[in-house]
Amino acid sequence: MSESGHSQPGMYGPGRRRRRRRGERDIGPPGQNLSGPSRDREYQQRERRDGSEDPPGPLIQKTPIILAKPPGDRAKPPQNTSTTGAPVLEKPIMLMKARDEGGKPGTPQETAPQPSGPGPSKMEKEGQRPTQPVYQIQYRGMGPSASSSAVDPMVGQAKLLPPEKMKHSIKLVDDQMNWCDSAMEYLRDQTDMLVVGVIGLQGSGKSTIMSLLSANTPEEDQRSYVFRAQSQEIKERGGNQSTGIDFFITQERVIFLDTQPMLSPSILDHLINNDRKLPPEYNLPHTYVEMQSLQIAAFLFTVCHVVIVVQDWFTDLNLYRFLQSAEMLKPSTPSASHDSSGSSGSDDGTEYYPHIVFLQNKARREDFCPRNLKNMHMVVDKLMAHSHLKYKGTLSMLDCNIFPGLGHDFLTTEVNMFLLPMQEGDGEDHLTKAGTYPLFSLLPGYRGHPTYSYMVSKLRSQILAMPRSQLSHTILTEKNWFHYAARIWDGVKKSSALSEYSRLLC
């Protein structure tokens, strides 16, 4: 029935209810006079549009989802615009600071100011605010009491910098046989290192070989080598270039130790002609020179992984006697308990011995003959048969493709021996071609071996691949090795065995 009180035909039929006026109530439960659930939902929707009361009964309400920005953010005009008027995307703000110890883990601190826009959103009412992500960087290893004011960003960057590169060698032991501390600044706290030392007679080419193994190439000028070689003037007057022990470390963390010549006649001549005062425990100059050489050799046998013995001809029996004496006077490896009153470590099988490489420098063409090479290996093996030094099994010329066709069974007694020919330009293989045809004069002479550069590269690869056995009972870093070597050198100079040996030489 309409408001005028007349019913309209077709408006209310069977199963339909008239529209309820405002303020009227239904008698009976809702939906009693409806024919279906769809009409009941339609009736409830009409009632909600009219602003009437909700029908009694359970009704599930869904929480609205806000997809728009807060009013404060919408009110702000765009600040970053390009010259063409196009908006530019804002970069995320990254705040790098240390995590406070007093805060709860995982709870970011509010650092951005609150927006001052009308009508706070629902997230702001609940204490949350859609802010940009805050990245916190925590400095690990700086101690539990580290704070943002005590953290230096340069400390973390310094650990990523490459180690300082050396340009030339420095002194580890000076000409007065005193220890030097200048090498400490080039060392690091890491254990992957290789220590290579060299000994040999005067003029055998020790400094040149060590320079080629460390940082130089044969094509460079010898005046730019890291270990200074003998100049022409020094060669003419029979002098020596190196004094004491020189130190150089490469970027691959390989330590090279170059030494003064063993049993040097030029050092003896310098002592006699300059009237240098000898230490009180030495009476004769030649005894002092020999004891200096034994101290250096015994020191290298204790602190080096590899010791290269350089000879420029094959062979000097006095050099092998010298090696046996240095091995006998070598200080014992310190025990884990640092007990100096005990016996030597060789009794219990824990004594350390380095690898020995016999390098034949300035080798002739006939030395590369397989038959002569086999005889040289046999002689060295007989001379070193009773030595504890590791003189065989770690270096082989047969692995360098220098002698094609020779198998590993060719050398039954192979020792650590390597042959280097005379360097190009030093007078080798300059055959006179007088009387030959012009065509043959353009061909290079027969060498019988590869080039000098090729042989040096093969030697370097073999030396760097030598085993890096443990020098002491504890694993040493580079800095620990320096302190260990300083203690060994001090023990060598004060050794009672060396003092007794020098007394017997008089």
Image (tube, rainbow, N blue to C red):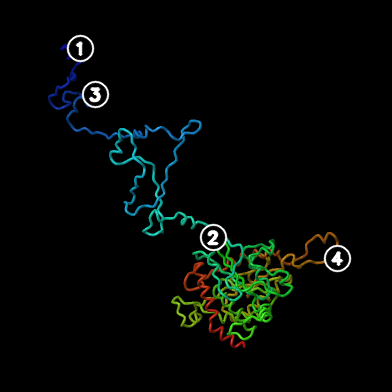
What is the C-alpha distance between the residues marked 1 and 2? 102 Å
Q: Is residue 414 visible?
A: no
From this view, report whether residue 471 is shown above or below residue 157: below
Residue 189 spot, x, y in % from top left: 49, 64
Label 3, secondary structure: give it. helix
Residue 336 spot, x, y in % from top left: 45, 75
Disc number lying in front (1 or 2): 2
Label 1, secondary structure: give it. loop
Question: Which residue in the protein does label 2 denote?
Answer: 163
User: In the image, is 299 to the left or to the right of 24?
Assistant: right
Residue 100 spot, x, y in % from top left: 35, 53
Label 3 amino acid? Arg
Q: Which mark is residue 23?
A: none
Question: Which residue in the protein does label 1 denote?
Answer: 9
* The C terminus - image quarter: bottom right
Q: Which mark is residue 434?
A: 4
Quadrant in the rendering for residue 489: bottom right
Which numbered disc, 2 or 4, marks the residue that appears first in the sequence? Answer: 2
